[in-house]
Image (cartoon, rainbow, N blue to C red):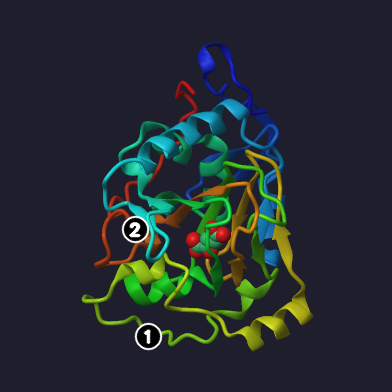
């Protein structure tokens, strides 16, 4: 179980009796409260997304929200605004300079899940908090993340995974993330798959409501007819994983409730792009394998 122990530390996870072998031969154990990692991998492989069984404790979410409030007020390039305004849309690369965000990326249940899904050691490729402010937070059009990572950064394969953490309650009115289950198995759609030659483009079009690579509306309608949609709603602390090639989107926030979600992208160490050019707060250059650590004082 994920519980806060004395001193606000996340208790370490007891190994259960379920064991499996990692590719490198080391034993990997299932962690109590986070279900069977092999079942998670099977569900994720099939659907392209997987909801973790346990939400993060409220104290962890509170601490992360404190970091988000603090960083949002800073004058730094990692803070991105909605087009033409000073409404904060997103914070990028916070794991590089904020202790709580860094600690989150090392949570044992996240590292174990990412290693299981990707088949070996992982590092943090990207970290962001997407803030949809009440009434002003704007949409994310239908797209596939791997289109950006392949074309802009030269990521070799989609052997990466996003883990999303809800920092606010997400409901149908505040712009929930919606995915098309199974669409990750179709590869990249409506996008030229050749990496682009580097340099000169504005990375803001990779993080704004006017996204550079999108999936056409007719295509989305046909996919949704065939495969359905999953609208990711849930309480604070809800966590779910989704595949870089899954077709996904979210609408404007038309409610009075903020919708903040934090997204960690873990990449397989062997899948690092060889010469990325986008800023390091969008594409981390540190590919050192992550080690799990539950010792942070939340
Ligand atoms: O925050 C959202 O609703 C969508 C985020 C997203 O699709 C992305 O960051 O690629």
Query: In the image, residue 258 lies at what x, y percent?
Result: 58, 47
Label 1 crowding class (10 Å Cα cut-off): few <14, some 14-19, many 20+? few
Label 2 crowding class (10 Å Cα cut-off): few <14, some 14-19, many 20+? many
Q: Which residue is mark 2?
A: 282
Residue 57 vs residue 83, the one in the foreground = 83
Left or right relative to 192: residue 228: right
Residue at (58, 16) in percent of width and height: 5
Q: Which residue is mark 1?
A: 194
Q: Secondary structure at mark 2?
A: loop
Query: In the image, residue 161 lies at what x, y percent?
Result: 52, 58
**Disc marking residue 292:** none
Residue at (53, 57) in percent of width and height: 136
Residue at (35, 40) in percent of width and height: 73
- Of mark 2 and mark 1, the one earlier in the sequence is 1
Left or right relative to 221: residue 116: left
Quarter of the picture containing the N terminus is top right
Is the residue marked 1 within 8 Å of ligand 1, measured from its CB?
A: no
Query: In the image, residue 144 lies at what x, y percent?
Result: 53, 72
Locate residue 296: give its quadrant: top left
Residue lying furthest left: 200
Residue 236 vs residue 174, the one in the foreground = 174
Residue at (34, 81) in percent of width and height: 195
In the displayed structure, would residue 32 be above or below residue 200?
A: above
């Amino acid at each position: 179980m994920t519980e806060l122990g004395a001193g606000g530390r996340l208790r370490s996870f007891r190994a259960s009796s379920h064991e499996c072998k990692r590719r490198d031969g080391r034993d990997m154990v299932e962690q109590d409260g986070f279900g069977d990692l092999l079942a998670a991998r099977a569900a994720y492989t099939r659907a392209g997304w997987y909801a973790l069984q346990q939400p993060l404790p409220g104290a962890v979410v509170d601490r992360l929200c404190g970091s988000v409030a603090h960083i949002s007020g800073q004058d730094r390039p990692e803070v991105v605004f909605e087009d033409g305004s000073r409404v904060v849309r997103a914070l990028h690369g916070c794991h590089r300079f904020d202790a709580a965000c860094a600690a989150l990326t090392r949570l044992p249940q996240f590292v174990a899940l990412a290693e299981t899904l990707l088949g070996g050691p992982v590092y943090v490729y990207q970290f962001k908090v997407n803030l949809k402010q009440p009434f002003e937070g704007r949409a994310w059009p239908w797209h596939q993340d791997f289109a950006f990572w392949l074309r802009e950064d030269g990521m070799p394969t989609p052997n990466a995974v996003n883990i999303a953490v809800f920092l606010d309650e997400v409901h149908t009115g505040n712009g929930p993330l919606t995915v098309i289950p199974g669409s990750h198995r179709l590869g990249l759609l409506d996008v030229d798959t050749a990496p682009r030659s580097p340099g000169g483009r504005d990375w803001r079009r990779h993080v704004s409501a006017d996204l550079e690579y999108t999936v056409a509306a007719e295509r989305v309608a046909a996919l949704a007819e065939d495969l359905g949609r999953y609208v990711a709603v849930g309480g604070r602390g809800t966590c779910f994983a989704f595949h870089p090639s899954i077709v996904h989107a979210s609408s404007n926030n038309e409610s009075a409730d903020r919708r903040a979600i934090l997204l960690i992208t873990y990449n397989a160490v062997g899948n690092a792009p060889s010469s990325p050019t986008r800023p390091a707060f969008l594409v981390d250059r540190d590919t050192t394998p992550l080690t799990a650590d539950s010792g942070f004082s939340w």
